[in-house]
Amino acid sequence: MYYRRVLSAIMFLSVSVIYNGCDTVTNSISTVSGKVRSYEYLNVSNIKVTIGNNSVYTASDGSFSLDNFTYPYDVIVSDSLRRFATVFKGLSENNITLPVRTFFSDNYFFIYVKFPYHFIHSELSGKIMFTDGNHVNSYSDIDFLNPEYPTRLYVQSSGAVTGKVILLSYKTNSQNGIISYENFGESPEMLLLPGNSYNYEFDSLNIQFNPGEQNVSGSVSAPNGYNSYSYFYLNFSSVNALYGEVTIGIPPYRFSFLGEKDFNFIIPTGLARNFKTIVETLTLRAADGYSREEFYVHPNSANSLQTNSYPSLVSPENLAANVNTGTLFSFDAGSGSGVYIANIYVYALDLLTEYHIVTSNNNFTLEGLEEIGIGSLKNSNLTWHVTKVGPVTSMNDYATTFLNQPNHFISKSNSRRFSTEP
C-alpha cells in the first residue's frame, strides 16, 4: 500500500510538470506575477490587472501578483479613468510582461542642446539622440537653419534615468541620401529626473571626431500585389527600443529614405559607441492597411528582407447592424509569425472607449467586454480593426519575450464600422 501511494504521487507530479510546459495547461492552481509596460518599455503604474474574480493595481514599477486561479487564464488590464482595457487571452505562464498599446506617461523631461556657432552651416544635417543604453531613447533633428536656438529633445521615462546625449552630423545629396558623416560626439553621463529641463552644450573638442563610412546593401521583397518603402536608422542602445505605434510620415529617428526594393547606403565607422543598423519597411496595398517591420542589417552581408502581408477583415461586413455579444468577428491572418490585437473603439457623448483583445486566434466575440465596466457596448456605433504583431509563436511567447525580440513587425488591417443592438 505504501509503494502504491508513492507511485501515485510520482505519477501526479510527473503529469503536473508535463502540463506546466505547455500553452494549453488546465486545472493547475498557481500564482502569476509580472509587469505591465507600454510598447516603449515604460512601466505602467496604478493600473488594474484582473484574472477571474481577483484584481490588483500595479505598483510604481508596473509590477503585480495574483493568486489562486486555473490554467489557461485571461488577463484584463484596464484603466477606467482613460477608458481603455486590454484582454490577453489564453495564457499559462507564471511570470509575464504585458505590453499595452494605450498609455500616456506623465514622466518626461526636456534636454536643450547647443553647439559651437561655427559648427552650424547649411551643408550639414544631423541628429541629436539621448539614450540610457537600454530602453530610454529619444531622437531629434538638428535645426541648422536657426543656430541661435538649441535643439530640443523630448524624453519619456518611468523615473530617474542616467544616459548620454549623442550628436551625429552628416552631409546629404539632393535626394536627402547621406553621402558622408562629418562629426560625432557624446556628452558625459547625465542624471535626469522627470518633470525637469536640462541644458547641454557641445564644444569643438567633443564633436571633432570625423567618422569613416562603409556600405550596407540589400533588397526588400514584398508579397504579390504589395508595394514596400524603406528607411534606415541607427540605434545606439543595447535593445531595439523604438518599436511602437506607427506614425505615417518621417519620424525623427529615420535617417534617410532608401526606396522600394534594392537599397545601398552608408553607415559611420570608428565610433566610440556601438550601434545597430535597422532598416524599417512600410508595406502597402492600395489604402486598405499596412505592415511596418524592422530588420537588423549588416555591412558585407547579403541583406535579403522579406516583408509580410497584413490581416484583412472578413466578418461582420462593414456597417453591420444589430451586432451582439455572440456575433463572430473574423479576419484573414496575413503572413508572419505573431498574435492578433483586435482594436474596438466606441464613441459616445464625445467620450472614447477602447477595447483591445490580444489572441492567437483569427476570430473573437464581444462577450465579456460589457462586464469590464469602462463603457457600454449597447446601442452604440463602433469601429474595429486588427493588428498583428511579432515575431512570436504563441500568446505565452508574446507575454514573455516580445518586448526583447529583434526584428519586430506590426501589420494593420483596414477598419470597419458596426452598430450594436439596444
Image (cartoon, helix red, strand yellow):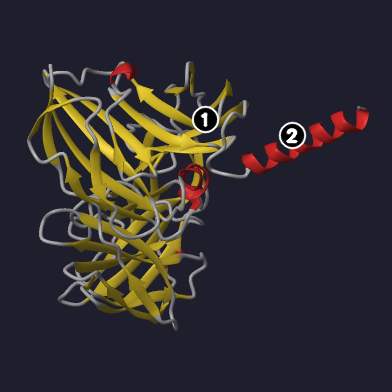
Q: Earlier in the sequence, mark 2 or mark 1?
A: 2
Task: Determine whether the residue tagged by mark 2 lies in a helix, strand or loop.
Answer: helix
Height in image: 235 above or below 80? Answer: below
- Which residue was labeled with disc 2? 12
Instruction: Give how far across and how far down residue 166 sits, in percent.
Output: 42, 58
Q: Which residue corresponds to the image point at 51% horizontal and 66% vertical from the top-left?
A: 274
Give above or below for 354 relative to 20. above
The three-letter amino acid code for the residue at tag 2 is Phe
Q: Looking at this view, is 210 or 109 the one in front?
A: 109
Label for residue 61? 1
Q: Residue furthest front?
A: 1
In the drawing, does residue 83 fall left or right of residue 63? left
- Say above or below: 187 vs 349: below
Mark 2–mark 1 Cα distance, whole angstroms, equals 37 Å
307 on left or right of 407: left
In the rendered structure, which amino acid carries the disc numbered 1? Asp
